[in-house]
Amino acid sequence: MNTTGDARILEVDDLVVRYPVARGLVGTLARRPKQQVHAVEGVSFTLRRGEMLALVGESGCGKTTTAQAVLRLVDADAGTITLQGQDISKTPRGQLRGLRRRVQIIYQDPYESLDPRFTVRRTVEEPMKIHKIGGDESERRERVAAALARVGLEPPDLFLERYPHELSGGQRQRVVVAASLVLEPELLVADEPVSMLDVSVRAGVLELFDALRRSGLAILMITHDLSTAAHYADRIAVMYLGRIVEEGPAKEVVNDPQHPYTKALMSVIPDADPRKRRTAQILSGETPNPVTVPPGCRFHPRCPLVASGRALEVGMEERCRGEDLGLAEVLPGHFAACHLAAPAQVSGA
Amino acid sequence: MSETILSVEDLHVWFDLPRGGVLHAVQGVSLSVDRGERFGLVGESGCGKTTTILAMMGLLPPNATVSGRVLLEGEDVLAEGERSARPHRWVDISMIFQGAMNALNPVQTVGAQILEPMELHGYATGVDARERAGTLLELVGIGRDRLDRFPHEFSGGMRQRAAIAMALACEPKVILADEPTTALDVMVQAQILGLLERLSEELGLTVILVTHDLPLVAHVCHRAAVMYGGILAEVGPMDALYHDPRHPYTRMLFSAVPDPTGESEVISIPGAPPRLDRPIPGCPFEPRCDRAFEPCSSVRPRQISLTDGREASCHLNDPALTEAS
């Protein structure tokens, strides 16, 4: 099948990324076994043109590593990463410049991603010079102005000659976005793009990402904030210990979660309305170390369904403890990796 | 229940800037907190919330000038500078600093760090102090067998618990928590918030939670003060702030926060917070306010008492002004 014609921008299939754990001199001499951090263990997802997918999870769940693998900032140990029909997971580093243009990343801290000695004009123009695109100087100037207008820094003349310290946090992040847009990327990876910004300006920057998505860009957003994901993403993928444990339409995932981990996460997210107090289902302890992933379902040691005896009641506990599992469709277009989640009824059966 | 334990009266704080000029960080804040209450101090970066609680602790840096009063059980902490603040600090009022979990001394055991304030303030020594440190660790949900462990052997959530235990060492009456969960994951955040709630209830502790995170305050606190540009925009019970805000900033700030269902409309506030290194004649929120009218740019609104113990600094609450326009 010709995949270049359809709307699929990015396909990640069974991605695995492991990092070696440094043993130190003593460890090496003592011949302690080599250990690995299982950062990403078999992650698959698809991202289409004009779609925003939010990878959500707690620190150490593998969401940032997944994004870094997509950007080829870390190498995949297994699996494929297909960008518009072309597997980029094994492209030699020297030939990545094309990829670097097509996939852009927005980092968390706009205070650190901008060079304090560069004016806004130079910051936005620089990427075009590096990639030798954008025509001559006057054309580039026009492109810079157009990009600034697109990110809401209007009129552009007012911002062109300013330095980062003369801008607010929200304006800085808009400059960062403008500097990626001049390269006309197909995919934007946004790693916690608003978490450093003040609450009152966050929505404005997120609206900008939403507008870019509507104009056809594919956006992979990495966030720990389910509320933000619920509002702006089309789909949410919840990660736990290197795996996607639930994936589905954004509003459905937050309002009708199918995996006990997602359910627990949702139960502890405070609402600004004090009348909407939920019963928090606080999981004990913290996420286990990804060096020693529990056997069976990796969530079972903290799973409320196992702890409460519910899993035993329905005769599943043995499988929870012993049998690892992948995502299964439990509602149309909504997937979960749980032995206790009911599989979707096959329509017409 | 409603006995005031801590009150701030017309607090002003100015900072001398290194390159000349003065930053008026807190511009006349008054508030009072009841014994055993969980009180929120909410606002965005630079609004003066951290400066306000540092003043309560008597911990402002040397380039700060202060006026106004901070009364702790009726005694003015600010009256004679360090001499009046020191006897109360850590003993009657203590603080969990922002990023406290990363501020533990890496070469000292956690137990030694909990013992230190007790011995320093003559609260307990030797075996007694060690016994109490163990009890404190248990109180925050860590086994006492961990007393001799080092911070790097603890997870982030456990280090934050240890920082809370340190703040509790001398049995303070008031604890100031500055963004106590900012660097933590949601599940660990829920555990820490649950701990603070439990401590406030079991020990009758007064908790002042300082954060930019409105849902957090809504979840934990009985009442809250919303700060903006060095002033107190509004104070009131949490429910009233959300459902019946009396300052446009309160309303607009709540609208800027996404809710967990993804259903509500999220609207950002246009513009940016004011610079506090130049005088602001009127209301600091006026340039961003959707309800600003004639006096707002020139006349500073007073902090007016409304019904039900609520207060707001907004001309819209002044019938004389709104009817005239």
Image (cartoon, rainbow, N blue to C red):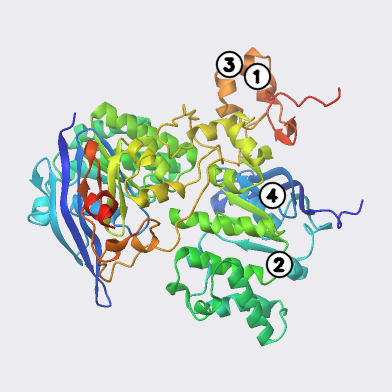
* Residues at marks 2 and 3, CA–CA distance in whole angstroms: 50 Å
Going by the image, does A202 lie left or right of B43?
Answer: right
Q: Report the mark closest to the observer, 4 or 3.
A: 3
Q: Is residue A109 above or below residue B18?
A: above
Mark 2 = which residue?
A100
Q: Amino acid at mark 2?
A: Arg
Q: Nearer the viewer, residue B147 or B252?
A: B252
Q: Which mark is residue B218?
A: none
Q: Amino acid at mark 3?
A: Gly
Q: Amino acid at mark 4?
A: Val
Q: Residue at x 54, y 75 (%)?
A: A155
Q: Amino acid at mark 1?
A: Glu
Q: Position of residue A22 (x, y in %)?
A: 58, 52
Going by the image, does B271 lie left or right of B11?
Answer: right
Q: Position of residue B123 (x, y in %)?
A: 15, 38
Tag 1 or tag 2, which sits nearer the N-term? 2
Q: Nearer the viewer, residue B224 or A197?
A: B224
Determine the residue located farthest toward the top in the rendered image.
A313
Q: Nearer the viewer, residue B285 or A17?
A: B285
Q: Position of residue B79 (x, y in %)?
A: 8, 54
* Residues at marks 4 and 3, CA–CA distance in whole angstroms: 34 Å
Q: Is residue B221 above or below residue A67?
A: above
Q: Secondary structure at mark 1?
A: helix
Mark 3 = which residue?
A309
Q: Position of residue B47 (x, y in %)?
A: 32, 57
Tag 1 or tag 4, which sits nearer the N-term? 4
Q: How many marks?
A: 4
Q: Secondary structure at mark 2?
A: helix
Q: Residue at x 27, y 71 (%)?
A: B278
* Residues at marks 1 and 3, CA–CA distance in whole angstroms: 8 Å
Q: Which mark is residue A17?
A: 4
Going by the image, does B145 lie left or right of A335?
Answer: left
